[in-house]
Amino acid sequence: METLENLLQLPYQTLAILVAGYLSYRLAYTGRDTTHRTLDTLAIALVFAFVAQAASAGFLILYNWKYPVPSGGALPLWAGYGASVGGIMVALVAAAVWRRVSVSAVPELLRSAGISSADRNTAAWETVINREDSGPSQITVVKKDGMALQCERLDDFKKAPFGPMILGQDGSIAIYVTDFRAPDSDDWEKVDPSHGDWGPEITIIPAGEISEVRIRHAPSLLGRWRRSRGAGDGSGIVGDVDGSAP
């Protein structure tokens, strides 16, 4: 309690910078901070705090340029608070942009430059669930008892209460099952997870029951163009895993 009181006694500019650093860190790394140590957290928060401080100083310079403060005069309180809030907003925007580019664009740039091919993740599953911009289009989960569950078109459930699917940090998966295949069968059977006013039914598969996961990604137009240039020929369309048309 005493520590909190001491923090509240700090100048509002300092409090704004600390708030900006914390909120920006949470925005940029929520769900991706499992491997972060205390030093990592503090260092990243300080980087975003510096962004907020620089932005606040920039806003104050612009204000003083448009409305010069007389020598020895005091800056209006609302201008100081406005600059601090503006700094927080800039830091949050920077955190949002970093969250988008740090998982895909930055590792790709480092690989292209021959610097590093690592992405900091400790497992392949972490890389998959952290690529929020990868555009998954279909998912198939094979259980240890041989049963396979599939959501054929994830786009059909974009507006569902929990989104098209949930990939848990512990390896569990939740999907809206549209097809299933029994352990002793080679044929897929259709299932309708929608129940009218009741809403779509989501199925949760614990990590301990999963034997295999197959996720198909629909490349963007830019991705298709780049793939066609790299391949030289071919349609660039990935065939169905089981050999049948989706």
Image: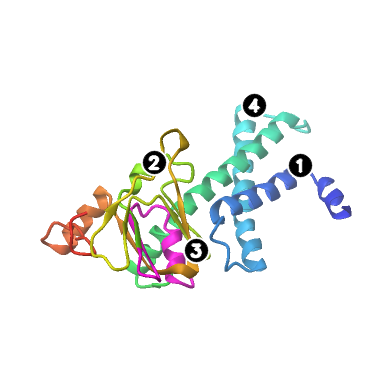
Residue 106 at x, y percent in the picture? 41, 61
Three-letter amino acid code at disc 3?
Pro
Three-letter amino acid code at disc 1?
Tyr
Q: Secondary structure at mark 3?
A: loop
Q: Nearer the viewer, mark 3 or mark 4?
A: 3
Residue 78 at x, y percent in the picture? 72, 29
Circle 1 sits on which residue?
A: 12
Q: Secondary structure at mark 2?
A: loop
Q: Is residue 73 shown left or right of residue 130?
A: right
Q: Secondary structure at mark 1?
A: helix
Circle 3 sits on which residue?
A: 206
> What is the spatial separation of the Cα atoms under label 2 and label 1, in whole angstroms?
51 Å
Circle 2 sits on which residue?
A: 194
Mark number, residue 235 = none
Q: Is residue 48 shown left or right of residue 184?
A: right
What residue is shown at x 67% (from left), y 39% (from top)?
84
Q: Is residue 89 above or below residue 118?
A: above
Q: Earlier in the sequence, mark 1 or mark 4?
A: 1
Three-letter amino acid code at disc 2?
Ser
Residue 127 at x, y percent in the picture? 43, 65
